[in-house]
Amino acid sequence: MGVTRGFIAGLDSTAGVAHRHTPGWLPCARRQGWEAGGVPDDQSVARATAHYPAAEITPAEFEQFVVDLLESASTAVDALRVTLHDKIQGTDGLYDFDATVRFRMGGMDFLVLVEAKRHKNPVKRELVQVLHDKLRSVGAQKAAMIATAPYQSGALDYAKTHGIALATVTEGRFTYETKSAYGAAAMTRQQAKERFGLPDFVGHVYGPGDEPGSTRVMLLSTEYVVEMLLSVTHEDPPA
């Protein structure tokens, strides 16, 4: 396992949301003004990805979160290596990826492409589609996008159709559901850590649900990093 650092400086800035509404906070999409009328369906915010208030996360914190998240799969696969700002030659040009994950499983080598989007506004379908095009160009087995903002409905639908893993990052303190009817002030990170052992940041991943058109939402534990972000099988072709 290893990591080569150095990609966050070039990312767009600020904000993020994730999975479950906490009493005392208005729904995040409404608070951020992401539900304006007259927006085409595929450009509206996918509600499954927009339930928490925006995370306050610095570029350095975001980089460390992404690295820790990807490296957590090292117990499930062999020779896992995370490389940031990785340049790979494709069939139609040279691509610079925010991160890549290489590992071995079943005696074969695998490559996963990762794009990290530290955005203020919801992630558009076009960005997910471009990532899918890059996957085919470089011959990777999987691609994942990790964002600090929610995704537009078109982006989520495209990702579920084409097997692109989408994830968001939010603050651990926002995942604690209060029972107060008076809209109690949110805990600080330190309070959340001392009272409930909550981490500063957590991730959620989104994929196809059991019912047609539904979305499966999961907290990103090591198990789901392997299942959703690195979801490859022994039958997949090697890189």
Image (cartoon, rainbow, N blue to C red):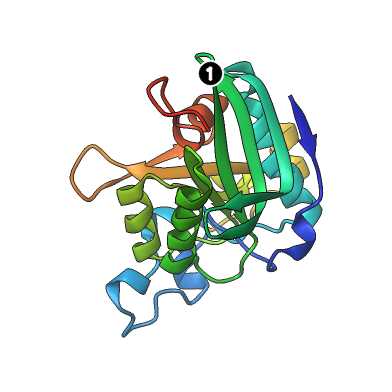
Residue carrying label 1: 105
What's under tag 1, amino acid-wise? Met
> Residue sitting at 72 percent across and 36 percent down?
193
Residue at far bottom of view: 38
Is residue 200 shown to the viewer in this render?
A: no
Residue at the front extreme, as displayed: 91
Using the rendered image of the protein, determine whether residue 147 is visible from the camera's viewpoint: yes
Query: Which is more toward the observer, 76 or 153?
Result: 76
Q: Residue 196: where, in percent of width, then height? A: 65, 32
Is residue 185 found left or right of 231 in the rendered image? Answer: right
Q: In the image, residue 153 lies at what x, y percent?
A: 35, 63
User: Is residue 42 found left or right of 191 in the rendered image?
Assistant: left
Query: Is residue 57 rendered to the left or right of residue 175?
Result: right
Task: Tell me if residue 114 comes above or below residue 104 in the rendering.
Answer: below
Q: Position of residue 233 (x, y in %)?
A: 41, 24
> Of 93 and 26, which appears nearest the observer?
93
Tell me which corner region of the image, top left, top right, bottom left or bottom right, holds residue 54.
Answer: bottom right
Q: Quadrant of the N terminus?
A: top right
Q: Which residue is drawn at the image coordinates 63% and 57% (left, top)?
A: 95
